[in-house]
Image (cartoon, helix red, strand yellow):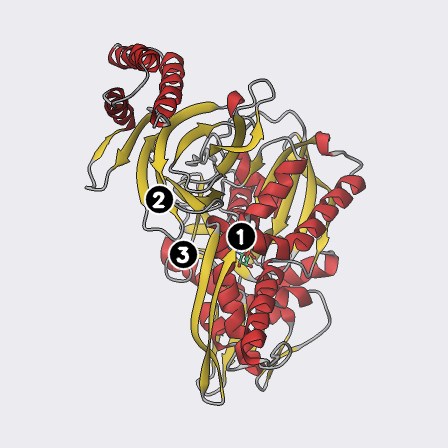
Amino acid sequence: MTNIENIGEVICGIDLGTTNSCISYLREGKPFVVPVEGTSAIMPSVVSYDESAEIMIVGREALNRLAAFPNHTVRSIKRLMGKDTKVHLGKKTYTPEDVSSFILKMLVEKAANITGKTIKKAVITVPAYFDDAQRRATISAGELAGLEVLRIVNEPTAASLVYDYVTKEDDMNSPYILVYDLGGGTFDVSILEIKGEIKEVLASCGDTSLGGDDFDERLVGLFLRNIREKTGMDFSSDNRALHMRLKEIAERTKIILSDKPYTTVREASIIVIDGNPINLDIEIQRDEYEDMISDLVNKTIEKVNEALEEARLTIGDIGEVLLVGGTTRTPMVQQALSEIFDIPIYHSVDPDLCVSLGAAVQSGLITGEPLGHILLDVTSHSLGIKTADDFDEETMDPDHFSMIIRRNTKIPVRKADIYYSTYDNQDKVLIEVFQGESNSCKENTLIGKFIYELKPAPVYCPVVAEFSYDKEGIVHITMQQKGYNNSKDVTLDVRNREVKEKDASGDTRSVLNYIVEKYKKIVAKEGLPEDLKLELVKIGTAYERALRDGKDEDTIDDLETLLIEKMEEAEDVE
Ligand code: AMP
């Protein structure tokens, strides 16, 4: 067995991507990514030549030069790998292998700085569909960068290698894994079969011109329509600088919409017409954005079905679905997959990084480095709230679990969704927080509830529920009535099931006590019918006693539900 740390050498795993690249290495049996751009591990796969300084620029700085120096800058070189072609960077001419080698050299330099070790060997990943010429070109690029390429590994295989070392709750009972990889410019879906230590790619298909960039373009289209409405002018095809600025805004907007139910795009002076600056000021709802991208998501699902057909498998044969590529953070993508697969969808390892991490794991497998388990902080259950989108067939009570944070999401995480009031001047809502995987709250676990008072507003008033889950297992919930100065913060300890809420003074107190306090106030209310008062006291006393005696959670839950129902009944008495 070789301990690579001792021989002053580190073998790296490199994800040489179309849009972005990253590099990882093994330390004490665990893969780590190298920060290559400040603290970010992701480096744009862009190369630019500065003719005046006669230097090659790689990464974010090169990307920043793209608009100003398009003839000196090249991106997406991966698309040309294996082709007998040349690219021009100013007066210089390079092969695709040369350009890729500049990217590799930069990554290796950064890794050498971080590890303090020489890097001479690497494992490099390629898409499963790469043919022989494309694979050979990738090896040449590595050699031109001064590397010995120990192995070329398929990207989905690399991604699945990371998951082998992640501690998982579920034991997979099928040897088939589906890897869904939706990046910036490409989409790949692969089906792997595990045969002992070996992973075989059974099917691989995709679309080399489908990815997050297309999602951005849909938003750019919306912005252009907005500008046209304001100015009567159409900028759709020309004006490259405007297009680049809009694309940047679109990407930012898209990323916000992955976590929030709506966002407002406010950009001053997007274009100046006859001396008048035109601003962008649009509110976009996630639903609206999802309508714009649904055909793109559906296209990927068609490819999933094609891959299954090619592998002669059905949906039920797949034991695990792994998500790779930044665009898989889009909730609609995860939703579409969880609608067709009734199994865990793994996206707990950072989808941008797992291919390079897996390549580092592969380097350890080659050198015999003992590999440790990767411990991830992930949510073990989905978290959400009860809504009236569905009803219990027996009792006709509302019973729909509206998920806000999906199971297996890496923590810390912050997610929000939007809900609506159900009648005019609704004065409060009971927020019941559940964890579990069923669409029915009855089958999930209630982990806390609280009342959120609403300001008078017409029916269908939007209310945003934002959940942020930290590493200690604490969920902070912020309720916000949109358009009204009315927010409420509640803290919920998922592990100890204690609910605390912050009042206006910023003090924290237990919701349980809050319910008791509220019940006492209601009992003291004048004009309450005697029988209702008696019932209220009976349940309230039992509830207080159960809390004091530390009764089991189910008993407390049942009494609490009864008490809240009675309190609501009493509150309705004029
Ligand atoms: P990759 O090629 O895997 O690095 O993926 C890059 C793509 O992921 C780009 O189109 C990004 O805009 C997109 N992306 C990154 N983060 C998010 C996010 N939170 N939600 C949606 N798309 C994202």
Crowding around mark 1 (Cα neighbors within 10 Å: few <14, some 14 to 19, many 20+) is many
Which residue type does callout 3 highlight? Answer: Pro
Ligand 1 closer than 8 Å to label 1 CB = no
Tell me whether circle 3 and circle 1 mark residues in contact (CB < 8 Å).
Answer: no
Nearest the eye: 481 or 24: 481
Numbered disc 3: secondary structure: loop
User: Which residue in the protein does label 2 denote?
Assistant: 455
- Residue 128: percent from the left, percent from the top? 69, 50
Numbered disc 2: secondary structure: loop
Measure how far apart labels 3 and 2 are at the Cα level: 47 Å
Kindly indicate the quadrant of the structure image that contains residue 515.
top left
Which residue type does callout 1 highlight? Answer: Arg
User: Which residue in the protein does label 3 denote?
Assistant: 35
Nearest the eye: 48 or 446: 446
Q: Of label 2 and label 1, which has the lower sequence position? A: 1
Kindly indicate the quadrant of the structure image that contains residue 322.
top right
Q: Nearer the viewer, mark 3 or mark 2?
A: 2
Measure how far apart labels 3 and 1 are at the Cα level: 32 Å
Q: Nearer the viewer, mark 2 or mark 1?
A: 2
Please tell me how many numbered marks the rendered image carries. 3
Vertical relation: 341 (above or below) 441: below
Q: Of label 3 and label 1, which has the lower sequence position? A: 3
Residue 22 makes an appearance in the image: no
